[in-house]
Image (cartoon, rainbow, N blue to C red):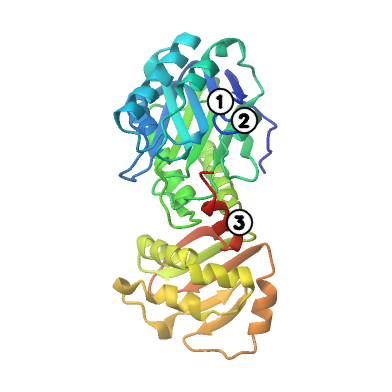
Amino acid sequence: MYDSFVYEPRGFTSCAKNINIKDDSLDFTVMLSRTRAKAAAVFTRNAFCGAPLVVGKEHVADGYLQAIVVNSKNANVATGEEGLVNARETARLVAEELGIREDDVLPSSTGVIGRPLPMGKIRAGINGLKDELAPNCLERSARAIMTTDTRPKMRSARIGDAVLVGMCKGSGMIEPNMATMLAYFLTDAQLPEGVLQPMMREVMDVSFNMVSVDTDTSTSDTAVLMANGEAGPVNIDAFRDTFERMAVELAKEVASDGEGATKLLEVVVSGARTKAQAKTVAKSIVNSPLVKTAVYGRDPNWGRVAMAIGKCEDFGIEPNRVRIAFGDITVYDGRDLGEQSLVAVSDYLANETVVIRVDLRMGGQAAVVWGCDLTEEYVHINADYTT
């Protein structure tokens, strides 16, 4: 239902290029709206949040933005006062170059933690930027925000006469407590006052907040929606539905592109007393290294799922009421169903998408979360990340 790199919203231009922060890949991008755009954003709750997030929160507080500037390969996190100075300078230089307000520029950085931004390279990259911006270049922006991602993650969709584009990056250090590491949504839809921020939080809660690759909440998590209104009004319910479905698709891409991953893992927990209980149990399963390695190795060891359910000890879960299934293959229903299904489960685990279903039989609430398997490659990637 969504197309990658097909539609682009009116009134947006962008530029993506290499400024040699770490290597010769695209590592710097600016996305500009022709006019000030209504904006909403959510950020990480990690106490070690990056300097760009401090500045970004200040700049989006009035509900408007006009430009987003992103560098990859350097997170500008744990860089003290120097990091804040550099983030503010980046926003100021972009604003001066483009002739817009400084507080309408949202800076983002992603990459290695603890290293100062190479401001000489940032300044050189901003110089002359105005003449480099062009329409229909957002696909390059989606590539420029990548770090260990194996592919760009981007979608576009039409809602009436309007277009919504979404892009994100994220592959490791993924256990968002608001959004994925970086996610940007741009639209030319004209949206009513007061709906963007509540909609943003609701959509993030059922999409990126339901993803986990490795249980680690990033210091740089940022999600932004900019709406410049150039396409005129749209049906707000249709827009919200499209936004949510797009965000869920992108969130699942983050999970399936987890560092070293070979499988997308979907965990569905039903029969919970509350949404919070369902989410806690589902996250316990999807985050378990033992479950993740079993899925990778096609080991039909459903006892690892039972363990992950059982360690959620504050919910009064009764094992004799729980049902566990892999896909449509039930392996436990209040009791061990024997070994006859284990071969079928092992065969099922060869699929690129593995669904684990758990029914707690305690209530009527449910949650769906996404993750991935855990492989040797995850260790290799993260053992060599800064070199």
Counting residues from the N terminus, which is met first, the one under dot 1 or under dot 3? Answer: 1
Q: Which residue is mark 1?
A: 29
Asked if residue 164 shows in the view, the reply is: yes
**For the residues carrying marks 1 and 2, which lies nearer the camera in this image?**
2
- Is 380 placed left or right of 192 in the picture? right
Between disc 3 and disc 2, whose residue precedes? Answer: 2
User: For the point 54% across and 18% down, which residue is it?
Assistant: 125
The answer for how far apart the CA atoms under marks 3 and 2 are is 22 Å
Label annotation for residue 26 = 2
Q: Is residue 304 above or below residue 287?
A: below
Question: Badge 3, how many Cα within 10 Å: few under 14, some, many 20+?
Answer: many
Proximity of marks 1 and 2: CB atoms separated by less than 8 Å? yes
Give the residue displayed 52% in from the left and 65% down from the top: 267
Residue 237 % position (x, y) = 50, 39
Give how far apart the Cα atoms at labels 1 and 3 are.
Answer: 26 Å
Q: CA distance from mark 1 to mark 2?
A: 8 Å
Q: Count the labels in the image.
A: 3
The reply to whether the C-beta atoms of the residues labelled 3 and 2 are less than 8 Å apart is no
| Identity of the residue furthest to the bottom in this view | 338
Q: Amino acid at mark 1?
A: Thr
Task: Please state the horizontal and vertical placement of residue 261, each as a whole percent of the image.
Answer: 61, 58
What's the residue type where badge 2 is placed?
A: Leu
Q: Which residue is mark 3?
A: 260
Q: In which quadrant of the rendered image does the C terminus lie?
A: top right
Does residue 235 show up?
no
Residue drawn 69% across the image and 38% down it: 3
Kind of residue at disc 3: Gly
